[in-house]
Image (cartoon, coloured by chain):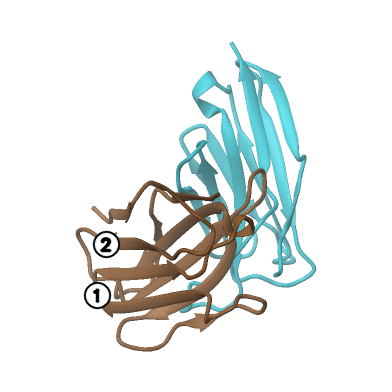
């Protein structure tokens, strides 16, 4: 149980375009979802926390107008990278907690390459 | 953002050797977690620690929550090639809210 999926697993887009990444909890209801960014050979850095039905809380230094997060249901959160630039190329990982909030389950990640 | 300091940064060992890595912070954490990340994948939880001084095992893995609540270590005994990967510690400051602060990572390579 407690499986989190991400789609797509990788995406290449042109500079200036927008790309949407989906994060789904497959077998549990995710009250809270988290979005992380991981640059090559670096650690995971939290970008934002989202609760179902409310606005996301962004970490300091993360542009909320550039990284749009929608947590419209208890099983789906989306991250949209707007007007992507090559420096946005990274590995984006989501995670989710269930109603107990006890453990955070991670998705497999999405590799974004902006050309 | 805040990060926890892990050491060593990388290790290259022979199969069968034991491995030890640690994680330190200037802040107090109420929960310590250890994750393993394989290339191109998300992290997978190995061990969770909830009390200062707690020592917990999961197969060949043993981890301890430091008494000061500012550090933790992970030991892997009798390493095998599939132990290769990046190991991250992570801390949670406030119980009940799962905001994780990750460590800088330890890259482990095991030669057969």
Residue B72 location (% of width, % of height): 68, 54
Q: Is residue B49 left or right of residue B19?
A: left
Q: Nearer the viewer, residue A43 or B95?
A: A43
Chain letter for mark 1, please. A
Question: At which x and y percent is residue A40?
Answer: 64, 45
Q: Which mark is residue A74?
A: 1
| Residue B101 vertical placement versus A1 (above, below) | below
The residue under the point 52% across, 42% down is B37
Which chain does the numbered disc 2 sit on? A
Viewer-proximal residue among A56 and A82: A82
Q: Residue at x 49, y 54 (%)?
A: A14
- The chain drawn in cyan is B
Instruction: Give me the C-alpha separation between circle 1 and circle 2.
Output: 8 Å
Quadrant the N terminus of chain B occupies? bottom right
The answer to whether marks 1 and 2 mark residues whose Cβ atoms lie closer than 8 Å is yes
Residue, far bottom = A54
Q: In the figure, residue A15 lies in which quadrant?
A: bottom right
Look at the image and tell me in which quarter the C terminus of chain B lies.
Answer: top right
Spot occupied by residue B6 in the image (x, y as percentages of width and height) = 74, 49
Give the vertical position of A99 relative to A96 (above or below). Answer: below
The brown one among the chains is: A
| Residue A33 drawn at (x, y percent) | 39, 71
Task: Say whether residue B32 is left or right of residue A55.
Answer: right
- Identify residue for label 2: A25
**Local crowd at mark 1 within 10 Å, few (<14), some, or many (≥20)?**
many
Number of dots carrying numbers: 2
For marks 1 and 2, the one nearer the N-term is: 2
Determine whether A83 is above or below A39 in the image: below
Can residue B100 be spotted in the picture? no
């Amino acid at each position: 149980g407690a499986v989190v999926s991400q789609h797509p697993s990788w995406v290449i887009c042109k500079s200036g375009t927008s790309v949407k990444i989906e994060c789904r909890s497959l077998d549990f209801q995710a009250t809270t979802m988290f979005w992380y960014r991981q640059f090559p050979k670096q650690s995971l850095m939290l970008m934002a926390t989202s609760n179902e039905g409310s606005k996301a809380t962004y970490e300091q230094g993360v542009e909320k107008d550039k990284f749009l997060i929608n947590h419209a249901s208890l099983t789906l959160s989306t991250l949209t990278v707007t007007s992507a630039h090559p420096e946005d190329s990274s590995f984006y990982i989501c995670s989710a907690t269930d109603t107990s909030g006890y453990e955070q389950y991670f998705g497999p990640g999405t590799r974004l390459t902006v050309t | 953002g805040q990060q926890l300091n892990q050491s060593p940064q990388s290790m290259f060992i022979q199969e069968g050797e034991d491995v030890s890595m640690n994680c330190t912070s200037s802040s107090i954490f109420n929960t310590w977690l250890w994750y393993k990340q394989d290339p191109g994948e998300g992290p997978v939880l190995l061990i969770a620690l909830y009390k200062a001084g707690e020592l917990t095992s999961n197969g060949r893995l043993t981890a301890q929550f430091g008494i000061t609540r500012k550090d933790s270590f992970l030991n892997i005994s009798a390493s095998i090639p599939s132990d290769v990967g990046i190991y991250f510690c992570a801390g949670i400051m406030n119980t009940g809210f799962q905001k994780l602060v990750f460590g800088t990572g330890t890259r482990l390579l095991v030669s057969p």
